[in-house]
Image (tube, rainbow, N blue to C red):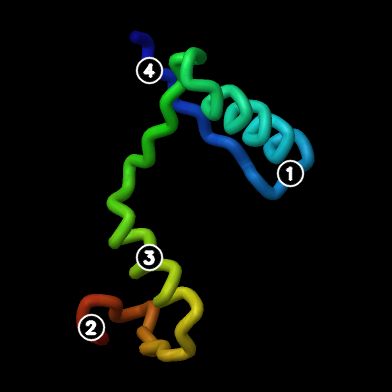
Amino acid sequence: MTTITLKINERSKTGKALKEMIDALAGKSESGVQIVSPYDSKFVEMVKKSAQSKNRTPINAQNVWESL
């Protein structure tokens, strides 16, 4: 089995089309295509939840380590 890593911009027209094509191929069990996420699903949920949250901590860019 060969592993191919693709970076697809899902916001572009071409990226959407390519992703749809790959998803269609992966839907067929005999195709041999397997989509693997490099991230843990719990981590992805945590990041998405924090992105939607309005809680922010201002950090001084001049003294990053001191402001933390």
Would you name the residue on which mark 4 appears? 3
Would you name the residue on which mark 1 appears? 12
Q: Picture quarter containing residue 28?
A: top right
Q: Nearer the viewer, mark 2 or mark 1?
A: 1
* Label 2 crowd bin: few (<14), some (14–19), many (20+), radius 10 Å: few
4 and 3 marks in contact (CB < 8 Å): no
- Above-or-below relation of 52 to 12: below
Task: State how far apart marks 4 and 1 are (Cα).
Answer: 24 Å
4 and 1 marks in contact (CB < 8 Å): no
* Label 4 crowd bin: few (<14), some (14–19), many (20+), radius 10 Å: few
Kind of residue sitting beneath label 3? Glu
Secondary-structure class at tag 3: helix
Task: State how far apart marks 3 and 1 are (Cα).
Answer: 24 Å
Q: Picture quarter containing residue 16?
A: top right
Label of residue 45 in the image: 3
Relative to the observer, which residue lies in front, 13 or 58?
13
- Above-or-below relation of 48 to 59: above
Q: Report the side of 37 relative to 16 (left or right).
A: left
Quadrant position of the C terminus in the picture: bottom left
Residue for point 37% across, 88% down: 57
Task: State how far apart marks 2 and 3 are (Cα).
Answer: 24 Å
Q: Position of residue 18 (x, y in %)?
A: 67, 30
Q: Position of residue 24 (x, y in %)?
A: 62, 28
Relative to the observer, which residue lies in front, 27 or 65?
27
Residue for point 37% across, 85% down: 60
Would you name the residue on which mark 2 appears? 68
Q: Nearer the viewer, mark 2 or mark 3?
A: 3
* Label 3 crowd bin: few (<14), some (14–19), many (20+), radius 10 Å: few
